[in-house]
Image: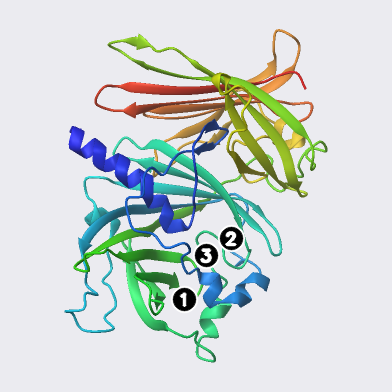
Amino acid sequence: MSRSRLLSLLCAAAVCLAVFGVSSSSVMGLPSQLIGSRGPALIERESDSQSILDLFPELKSLPAPLWVQEGLRVYYRTSAATVPNPMAKSSREGIAPPIMHPEKLSPAAPAVVRTDVIALDTRFSATSSTLFIGDLMIPWEDVTRTAYAGAGDFWINPVVIKNLARRPPDQLVVSEVQYEADGITYDCTRFDYGPKGSNRHHVWIFQSSTGLLVYQAQWLVLSDESLSYVSAAEFVTKRNMSLPWSGQAAPGWVKPGARMTYQGAIRTWMPTTGPGIPIPAFLEVEMAEAGQNWSIAKVRRVFSGDDGQIGTTKNVHSGAGKIGGFWLPVSGLTRLRNGDKLDPFDPVVGSTVEVSYAGKTQSGISVVAIFEWGAQYKRVWIYRITDGKLIYWLDEKLVDPITRLVQQAEWQLTEE
């Protein structure tokens, strides 16, 4: 891999999650939640972008489609690049932008977003997404978010598609199209939206019968109107994961106000130089909201050299449909045995998740250790069986394929 290609990968990683409407800032190595910096502003931005909910506010009161369930995992190819502006003033007015397939948009910087539905209720959904970059499928960034059940990260209730003929939203162009993704052709409805006076244009393509998001793009016309910055995502596949704790309730201690503190360190090393000096830090975790099978924790990271200064606080979601998180249902943990395959093989990422240990520690604590590993990364979560609480986790990955630089974030629960 060349240095220029690595830079392309990192630039794409910094922005391509934006196509899903997710923002993040720097907190390192949370459980399944590497909240990484999106870096400097690579494109001109408006304060807010138009969302599908603004066009279809009725989605706020609709349930999720029946095919959306806890444990559902979907994959999207995603990429971003600056291209000639097809909507330039010199072109035909009102022209809709072409489809920009991610693999053609930026062939040197492939990326995949893997999203899990971790909790679902009548009007609420929570998802956890991981961005994998490069041919080596390195997990670069993780985010979790909540949404309405009727309009999640990758779906809308298809009722709004059927009702479009009655009252199409202003400035929304609707067309029936067929879309081919990963060798499968879908009958779809395309939405084009370009607000008057805005330099943005939004494209959504949903499968008409199910509401599955098949393609999405955001176009931003740059100050030089001959160029546009476009970020795009295209559906790859989906599958349902059957987890031992699916559908089970959160432990009783998961309620607003519950607090935990984790001590840890961030380390890097290279084969040529050996390990670097670890950076000590700790995380302060407080449950802000909780339901029967989900929680939202406020997490604040403080480095040892911060002199107690308040760090950035971020929300981290856990749910019964998630591998990793601050808790797992106790009844599910008690069923796990050494060698259990929670996800034998991820066909897109190439990873495996299994129970590496279920038993007692030297101090007599009953625990379960869950490992996820791919070609160039590994993640470990250790849960206490008696209360389902996360007591240790590790996130280790190759961050520079050229120098073989490895980064490791390790955290352990302190006395409560």
- Reading the image, the residue beneath label 2 is 68
Q: Position of residue 265 (x, y in %)?
A: 53, 19
Residue at x 41%, y 75% (from the top left corner): 188
Mark 1 crowdedness (10 Å alpha carbons): few <14, some 14-19, many ≥20:
many
In what quadrant of the picture does the C terminus appear?
top right
Q: Is residue 393 left or right of residue 107?
A: right
Whether label 3 touches label 2, CB < 8 Å: yes
- Reading the image, the residue beneath label 3 is 155
Residue at x 76%, y 11% (from the top left corner): 364
Residue 86 versus residue 48: which sits nearer the camera?
48
Alpha carbon of mark 3 to alpha carbon of mark 1: how far? Answer: 11 Å
Of the residues shown, which amino acid type is indicated by label 2?
Val
The label on residue 208 is 1
In what quadrant of the picture does the N terminus appear?
top left
Whether label 2 touches label 1, CB < 8 Å: no
Residue at x 32%, y 46% (from the top left corner): 12
Q: Earlier in the sequence, mark 3 or mark 2?
A: 2
Instruction: Reply above or below: 249 against 28.
Output: below
